[in-house]
C-alpha cells in the first residue's frame, strides 16, 4: 500500500505509459517499481486499480452525422442492339460520399416489362456519377425487343 502512495505522490500513471518514475531529477526516483516488486502483490494491486481518466464521450462526427438523403437518377441513354447497356446519371445531394441503389426497367413496344434490374452506384459528395447497366437476363436474341428504358427517378441512399 505504501508503494501506491509513493507512486501517487510522484505522479506515476499506468495509463500514459510514462511518468515521473523515470525522471532522474525527481527526489522519489528511487521508489520501487510496482511491476518489479519483490514483496509480492503490490504491483498487481496497482495495476488492477481503475484509471482516473475522464469519461469518454461520443465523437462529434458520430453525433452530428445526418442521415443520408436519397439521390436522383436520370436516364442518359437506353440499351440497343448496338449498345446493350443503359446509361444512367445518379446525383448525390449529401455532404459526404454515398452509395445509391437505382432501379431500371426495360420495356418492349407494348409497354410490357421485359426485365427490371437494380445497381449500386458510389457517388462522391455533392456530385454525380454515371453508370452503365447491362441488359442481363433477357438474352441477346431479345435485345431488339427493347423499346424503352425507365429509371426510377429516386436513387435510394444505402450507405
Image (cartoon, rainbow, N blue to C red):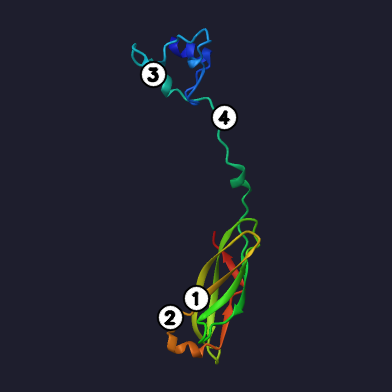
User: At x 42% / y 23%, what residue is drawn?
Assistant: 48
Camera-near label (4 vs 3) is 3
Helix, strand or loop for disc 2: loop
Tell me, for residue 137, which label it has, or none. 2
Residue that lies at the very extreme toward the front in this rendered image: 82
Nearer-N-terminus badge (2/4):
4
Mark 2 touches mark 1? (CB < 8 Å) = yes
How many other residues sit within 10 Å of disc 2, few (<14), some (14-19) or many (≥20)? few
* Alpha carbons under labels 4 and 1: distance apart: 52 Å
Helix, strand or loop for disc 4: loop
Camera-near label (4 vs 1) is 1
Whether residue 85 is situated above or below residue 71 in the rendered picture:
below
Residue that lies at the very extreme toward the top in this rendered image: 27
Whether residue 42 is situated above or below residue 148 in the rendered picture:
above
Tell me, for residue 117, which label it has, or none. 1
Q: Picture quarter containing residue 37?
A: top left
The quarter of the picture where the C terminus appears is bottom right
* Alpha carbons under labels 2 and 4: distance apart: 59 Å
Please state if 101 lies on the left or on the right of 39 as rendered: right
Question: Which residue matches tag 4?
Answer: 54
Whether residue 59 is situated above or below residue 138 in the rendered picture:
above
How many other residues sit within 10 Å of disc 4, few (<14), some (14-19) or many (≥20)? few
Nearer-N-terminus badge (1/3):
3
Tell me, for residue 35, which label it has, or none. 3
The quarter of the picture where the N terminus appears is top left
Amino acid at each position: 500500500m505504501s508503494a501506491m502512495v509513493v507512486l501517487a505522490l510522484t505522479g506515476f500513471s499506468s495509463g500514459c505509459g510514462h511518468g515521473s518514475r523515470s525522471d532522474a531529477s525527481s527526489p522519489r526516483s528511487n521508489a520501487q517499481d510496482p511491476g518489479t516488486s519483490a514483496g509480492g502483490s503490490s504491483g498487481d494491486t496497482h495495476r488492477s486499480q481503475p484509471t482516473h481518466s475522464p469519461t469518454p464521450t461520443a465523437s462529434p462526427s458520430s453525433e452530428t452525422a445526418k442521415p443520408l438523403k436519397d439521390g436522383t437518377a436520370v436516364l442518359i441513354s437506353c440499351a440497343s442492339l448496338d449498345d446493350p447497356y443503359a446509361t444512367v446519371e445518379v446525383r448525390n445531394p449529401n455532404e459526404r460520399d454515398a452509395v445509391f441503389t437505382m432501379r431500371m426497367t426495360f420495356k418492349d413496344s407494348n409497354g410490357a416489362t421485359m426485365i427490371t434490374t437494380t445497381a449500386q452506384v458510389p457517388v462522391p459528395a455533392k456530385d454525380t456519377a454515371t453508370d452503365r447497366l447491362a441488359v442481363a437476363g433477357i438474352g441477346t436474341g431479345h435485345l431488339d425487343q427493347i423499346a424503352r428504358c425507365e429509371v426510377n427517378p429516386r436513387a435510394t441512399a444505402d450507405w
